[in-house]
């Protein structure tokens, strides 16, 4: 038999074996207990749309009882993920075990198809090399280059009509990156291709992800409307630095800045004390600390409790 024909047949067999393995892995991911967004990230990795990916979960503990509940749930979830990854033969590294970090409970791990790519993303993450991380996550190079710069695009605020259409398309689960202002149309097409691939490979996972996003958005919009209705409560109930500090301490309010850093109640109060002698309006301080919605919500809930009593 012709050697070239043998090589060609071998390539066909290898391709068929790879496709069969991919299909089996997709089915296992689909049936797993992972959240829909984690499922999609893992499927895109399997289908060669990413070189590596993050998996994880986190939440804010509202009480000691809630903290214990989260730790138990996340420990079980992490065990389920590692069992799945071992089953489908993907290398991974746990980058954060289930732990308590300023009342935020969570875990994270990195996964890749090739050990070399796993080592690369772990190293890049340690060095805060966002560009290398972005490229390994499969994001378009044009978007990676403008990440965290004035040339990055916030679709939700800068293109609200486009965002509305993307939401109708069921695209939100695939917009976990910031497009660039110069190439956003091409980059959104890249994201649409990801959606198409998941739709073909696992339509149930796509529907699950869309439903999750819609539930999250609806919950946020409902809370925002309620908060807006009672926005004046903030001014009438938190008219001094002392009152603000008291509210934060009593309700154990945390805040997150634009970089995702979490400030616990004690740190927030220290920050407030540092500026208390400056000529700043209390509402300016609340806005700077990203506390307005949270403080309004807390005050409103306290008032409801009084009425219920």
Image (cartoon, rainbow, N blue to C red):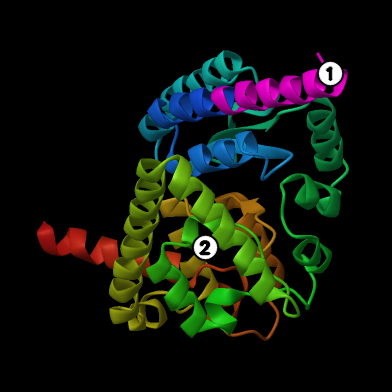
Q: Nearer the viewer, residue 226 or 299?
A: 226
Numbered mark located on residue 42 in the image: none
Please, what secondary structure does the residue beneath circle 2 have?
helix
Instruction: Where is residue 30? Give x, y as percent.
Output: 42, 31
Does residue 178 lie above or below 193 as drawn? below
Q: Earlier in the sequence, mark 1 or mark 2?
A: 1
Among the 4 quarters of the image, the one containing residue 223: bottom left
Residue at the spot of label 1 = 2
The magenta segment is 1-20
SS label for mark 1: loop
76 vs 288, nearest the viewer: 76
List x then y, in percent, for residue 5. Answer: 79, 23
The overriding secondary structure of the stretch rendered in magenta is helix
Which residue corresponds to the image point at 76% horizontal and 80% vertical from the top-left? 182
From the image, tell me which residue sits under label 2. Answer: 245
For residue 211, side relative to residue 266 (left or right): left
8 within the magenta span: yes
């Amino acid at each position: 038999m012709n050697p070239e024909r043998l090589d060609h047949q071998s390539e066909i067999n290898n391709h068929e074996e790879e496709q069969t393995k991919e299909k089996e892995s997709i089915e296992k991911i689909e049936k797993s207990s992972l959240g829909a967004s984690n499922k999609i990230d893992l499927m895109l990795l399997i289908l060669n749309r990413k070189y590596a990916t993050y998996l994880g979960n986190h939440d804010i503990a509202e009480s000691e009882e809630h903290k214990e509940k989260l730790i138990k749930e996340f420990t079980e979830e992490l065990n389920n993920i590692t069992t799945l990854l071992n089953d489908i033969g993907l290398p991974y590294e746990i980058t954060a075990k289930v732990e308590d970090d300023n009342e935020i409970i969570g875990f994270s791990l990195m996964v890749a198809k090739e050990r070399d790519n796993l080592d690369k993303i772990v190293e890049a993450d340690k060095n805060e090399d966002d560009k290398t991380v972005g490229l390994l996550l499969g994001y378009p190079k044009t978007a990676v280059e403008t990440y965290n710069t004035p040339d990055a695009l916030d679709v939700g605020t800068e293109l609200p009509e486009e965002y509305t259409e993307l939401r109708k398309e069921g695209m939100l689960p695939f917009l976990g990156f910031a497009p660039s202002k110069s190439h956003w149309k091409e980059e959104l097409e890249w994201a649409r291709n990801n959606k198409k691939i998941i739709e073909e490979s696992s339509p149930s996972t796509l529907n699950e992800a869309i439903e999750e996003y819609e539930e999250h958005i609806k919950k946020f919009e409902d809370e925002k409307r309620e908060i807006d209705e009672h926005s004046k409560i903030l001014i009438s109930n938190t008219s001094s630095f002392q009152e603000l500090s008291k509210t934060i301490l009593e309700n154990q309010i945390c805040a997150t800045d634009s970089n995702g850093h979490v400030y616990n109640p004690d740190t927030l109060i220290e920050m407030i004390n540092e500026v208390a002698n400056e000529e700043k309006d209390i509402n300016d301080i609340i806005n700077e600390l990203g506390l307005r919605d949270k403080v309004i919500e807390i005050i409103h809930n306290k008032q409801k409790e009084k009425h219920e009593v």
